[in-house]
Image (cartoon, rainbow, N blue to C red):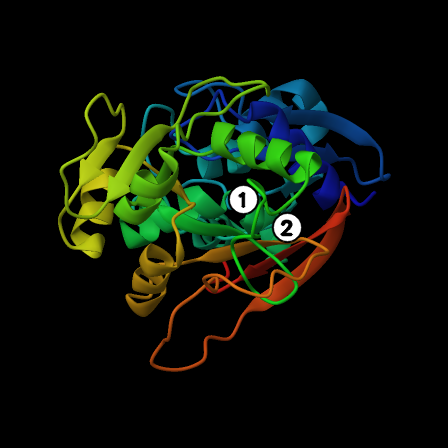
Amino acid sequence: MSHLARAVELAERGRGTTHPNPVVGAVVVSPAGEVVGEGWHERRGEPHGEVNALRAAGDRARGATLYVSMEPCAHHGTTPPCADAVVEAGIAKVVVGSRDPNPEAAGGVEHLQAAGVEVELVDSFEARRQNEAWRTWVSGRRPFVTYKVAATLDGRVTVPGARWVTGEESRRLVHALRASSDAVAVGMGTVRADAPRLDARDVPVLHQPRRLVFGRGPLPEGSELELRSGPLREELEALAAEGVQSLLLEGGPTLATAFFAEGLVDKVLLFVAPKISGEGPQMLGELAGPIALVRATARLVGDDVVIEAYVNEP
């Protein structure tokens, strides 16, 4: 494993405890190639990953190389600028996994270079992907939207005579996705047809997501879902202002098509079942033109194939 990959791995240890801040990991390597310090951003308001790694290295940081998953911040927030700490520690070179898209904190690379520190910007997709929701939230002022859909080989989202399109393993993965999202959303058509709960069940959950319905009400009596009836973009901006960084879109074809038409989908998770339905609604309606997807990957989950691809790369 490369030192930068290790920094990304360490960053994950802060998942769930740094929110609303990003996860960041760092590794300090001596001129002889020995790892002399590791650290990660552990909790919101506490020292960032590179500061923890520098503290672990102590005097051995002088003349060393720092590998960090995200550009050291250059502003005074709840903690002092990490870029200053790097310079004061005597680090000779910094390998940066990704730029900081936050306009308030960016500029660490230039700060380090001005202080005479050598900087290598790798711009790692894995490092950017790690904070994809946060990156969209701070730069676009809206949540990162993932469209999740289960479909048959002929692109249908229902199977006659069956409640589920995909298998149990895929459904469990969807609950894990809900547990890791700030909000989950469907449209009114799905509410009327399926009365979904939209909560995360039978998986580890730190916080249940907000459960949203986009569309015109009223909601069925006794519904615990939250109705959002305004224009989609305005609703997403309002949700972002309320701290929602990630939105898992589980709606039917009508809502999904509306999100795509507005350019509000960032990632697609397509669960393909080894079935042919033969009838029923397609996964999307008509759009004004084709949409290119990038960074596509596929993996088996039970008997299903899950395809992940980006509309907007983080």
User: CA gap, disc 1 to disc 2?
Assistant: 11 Å
Q: Is residue 36 visible?
A: yes
Residue 80 image point, x, y percent: 38, 27
Left or right: residue 90 compared with residue 135: right
Relative height, residue 306 to residue 246 (above, below): below
Residues 9 and 235: in front is 235
Q: Is residue 63 visible?
A: no
Location of mark 2 (residue)? 126
Q: Amino acid at mark 2?
A: Glu
Q: Amino acid at mark 1?
A: Met
Q: Residue at x 66, y 42 (%)?
A: 67
At mark 2, the secondary structure is helix
Q: Which image quarter is the N terminus in?
A: top right
Which residue lies most toward the bottom here?
A: 289
Residues 127 and 216: in front is 216
Q: Residue at x 50, y 48 (%)?
A: 112
Q: Residue at x 51, y 54 (%)?
A: 113
Which residue lies most toward the front here?
A: 161
Quadrant in the picture for residue 248: top left
At mark 1, the secondary structure is loop
Relative height, residue 168 to residue 255 (above, below): above
